[in-house]
Image (cartoon, rainbow, N blue to C red):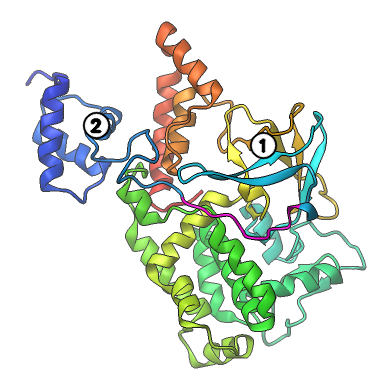
Amino acid sequence: MAQVISPSEEELKAALLALKSTNPTLGISKIHALLLTSHPEWTVSEKRTRKVLQSVGLVQNANAGAPGLFYPSSKVIEGLAVAKWTSKAEVRYFSKVKGKGLVATAHIAEGETIWKEDPFALAPEWNLYDLQTSGHACGYCSTPLTTSPLIVPCSASASATPCPVRFCSRLCLSRAGRTHPLLCTARNPASAALLHFARRNEWMGLHALAQVTARVLLTYNQDDKAFEEDWDVVRSLAQLGMEERAKGGWLNAEPDRAMWKKAHKLYLQAFQEPSTEAEKKRLAKLLKKPLKQETSESLFGYDAFLRGLGRMSLNLEAHGGLYVLHSHLNHSCTPNVSVRHLDQRTALSRITVLARRDIAPGEELFITYVNPELPLEQRRRQLMEWGFGKCVCERCVREEAERQVAGPKDGEQAAGDAADLEAELKAGLGVM
């Protein structure tokens, strides 16, 4: 049996450069597989392959914002009325790399409610979605339904064309008019295949994009001013398209472009070109106003679709809501703000933003994008998968220094390998 050896850094670098130069479109996983095929006598982890490729600039490294690299972009919403949510924070634009954020304008006490916010769009966790589609949770706010006499069914539901969705009140039914008609099996049956595809693959980003698209299209047909406001919100969200994530080296697995294209086809069938004449007629009853070419391209072009998926994945709150002011919050591994769902009996989808400690005027408000209980490397890896670069918050810098002195803790490597496997399974799709 041939002896298995670990190559030197220079040997590994030379081999990877040669493989990457002849296979420039392959991602880290496939380059790593080719490396082991070409050098069966070597033992090299994928993590080491990634690190070497990053060191020579062949995939995106930890320095977000360096020339030629991909990182999320965003813009400030002109005239955003922050005061309708809170008087204790304001939007601030920091830089092209960091983008925008929220800064305290007054002292905020520990435990204080900074603001409450209802979702711009909602793609709830799948257990709640299943309750919604079976009529056991409100189709608008996702609150589980009881036997209240206030509960009302979808107004379009009929024996011939049933819609199982129900609402906890007439107010929720009215508010659901912003999105539900285009996602209703009775009014737009062409959307069913897209929603089933998202559910089957547990693709929260795709479901959220369907919700946002439904809102934008219906508003476009109903109210010009409201459409401009909604469109500004969507275009201002932080974004990093799926292809940009792949090209930048942020995906831990090969991008599943076949799945992306299948999803795009179903997306077009749901909102633009249904597959049957009957479905086309139903959609035409909802969307009577022709889209401007620019708006149509921004919604339905394939590249625009991938950017839309990226927007959703970057901005969704952990339970599937997309919130306008919440989407401005940046990350820290020691957050000073937490987000809770406290109105569980009346408006489950409403978030309450609370101060975790005293916050001084001028201090930025932070939440955490990852589980803060994870060790340093896992937190950083999860953030980098979304294009945020190497986290250099105060906690990460301190833990990195401590680790260099003491070395990794027992069990961290095994936990990291398990997290790598889970991330690879999810990354190709781009799911949350």
- Which mark sits nearer the N-terminus, 1 or 2? 2
Marks 1 and 2, Cα distance to the nearest angstrom?
36 Å
Q: Residue furthest right?
A: 149
* Dot 2 crowding, Cα within 10 Å, few <14, some 14–19, many 20+: some
Kindly tell me whether residue 175 is visible in this rendering: yes
Image x and y of residue 127, in percent: 65, 53
Occupied quadrant, residue 7? top left
Q: Residue at image x 48%, y 89%?
A: 276
Q: On the rendered structure, is 2 left or right of 106? A: left
- Front: mark 1 or 2: 1
Picture layout, residue 431 above or below residue 172: above
* Dot 1 crowding, Cα within 10 Å, few <14, some 14–19, many 20+: many
Kindly tell me whether residue 181 is visible in this rendering: no
Label 2's element?
helix
User: What residue is pinned by disc 1?
Assistant: 365
User: What residue is pinned by disc 2?
Assistant: 49
The one nearer the camera, 294 or 344, is: 294
Image x and y of residue 23, in percent: 14, 48
Occupied quadrant, residue 158? bottom right
Write down the region rendered in magenta: 73-82
Q: Please state which amino acid type lies under the numbered disc 2.
A: Thr
Image x and y of residue 100, in percent: 57, 46
